[in-house]
Image: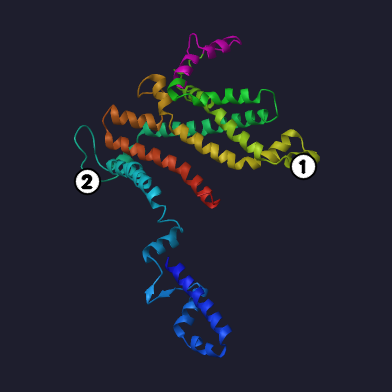
Amino acid sequence: MRDFLSTARTRLRRAADGDADSDDVGAGSERDDDPVSTGDAAATEAGAVVTDGGTAAGGDGFRDRLNERFGEDFTESAPFWLPPFLLVGLFVYGAIAWNFVISLTDYKGFVGPDYSDLDFEMYVRAVNDSGVIDATVNTFLLVVGFTTVALAVGLVLAILIDRNIRFENTFRTIYLLPMSLSFVVTAQFWLWMYNFNNGVVNIALGTVGIGPVDWIGNSSLVLWAVVFALVWQFSGYTMVVYLAGLRAIPTEHYEAARVDGASTLKMYWRVIIPQLKGSTISAAIVLMVFALKAFDFLYSLVSGYRPPNGADILATKMVREAYSTNNWAYASAIAIILFLMALSIIGPYLYYEYNQGNL
């Protein structure tokens, strides 16, 4: 408002000066000798600080500095983003920080934690615990195996559907449908499929003279049986992500590769797949996060905290330590290890997006 009044005043003075000049050119010396009006006009035109009767019109200095540092609408948009920011900070990152503090105590049983004696004893115990080491290896194999196979299957399905086949929407819906199921339904479904006596998998293998195979009871096979079930559930998701990436590639790239004499396999390997880098990274991050959340699947598979031998992961180990043996501090240390694994996946992705200007 002050700027508007100052600008209006300046324009009125200019208009008055113009009238005076037209009436009496020689009498204009009086206006030219007025330093105040001349200074106001010059300052207004230069966009500098405007004065109005000796009162500064620069606005709230602290608010201006915040807007200058974080964006011009930082303070105006604060009522919208600040409440959820504080809630997430308190109930998510505050809970993680509290869990870390508990992991530094000797909290066990039904006696409260003693915060006066903090150390890294639980982390040293976890490093020397063969159960935690096996669970960490199983978690790593589950994340890498599941993500790699799901990406490969999804890419093949996307390339096949992108060939303008008939009933494309029907196939796309069929492949994507398993993702809508919860881990509980998927676990019970594959528990029946893997049944030793009358499971569909063993019946199918029996027709070619293989089996029956104890998929759940064999410690060397159960982890890969879990990976296969998760791939069945989430390969449709990767198919949709890759299909969107393929549809975004200009047709000229396909035509240029064919003009250069590239075969279909070489065209996809040298030209098309390198352009799916963004789709691959996005899908891989989501799949890895789902793999770290496989606790629901394993819990539903055996209806308990103890998964089959060979399929124990950090999440099941953590819950078992917390709720079966009441080792709260030790379970908190395992939870922090699992959080660091998730952070090692999400952190580089966020850094990549930041460098791309997407954050």
Mark sitting on residue 304: none
Image coordinates of residue 228 in percent, x first then y, are 52, 24
Residue 177 visible, this angle: yes
Q: Nearer the viewer, residue 304 or 310?
A: 304
Residue ID at (58%, 22%) = 174
Residue ID at (31%, 35%) = 331
Task: Give the farthest residue toward the front.
Answer: 23
Residue range highlighted in magenta: 186-212
Mark nearest the camera among 1 and 2 is 1
Image coordinates of residue 85 in percent, x first then y, are 37, 47
Image coordinates of residue 171 in percent, x first then y, are 62, 23
Residue ID at (44%, 33%) = 292
Residue 130 visible, this angle: no
Where disc 1 sits, the SS reads helix
Q: Give the position of the N terminus as an image quadrant.
A: bottom left
Residue ID at (35%, 34%) = 129
Describe residue 117's horizontal placement relative to residue 306 as left or right.
Answer: left
Describe residue 88's horizontal placement relative to residue 140 as left or right.
Answer: left
The answer to the question of whether label 1 and label 2 lie on touching residues, with beta carbons closer than 8 A, is no
* The magenta stretch spans residue 248: no
- The amino acid type found where label 2 is placed reads Asp
Q: Which of 247 and 355 is in front in this view?
A: 247
Pointer 2 residue: 117
| Above-or-below relation of 325 to 126 | above
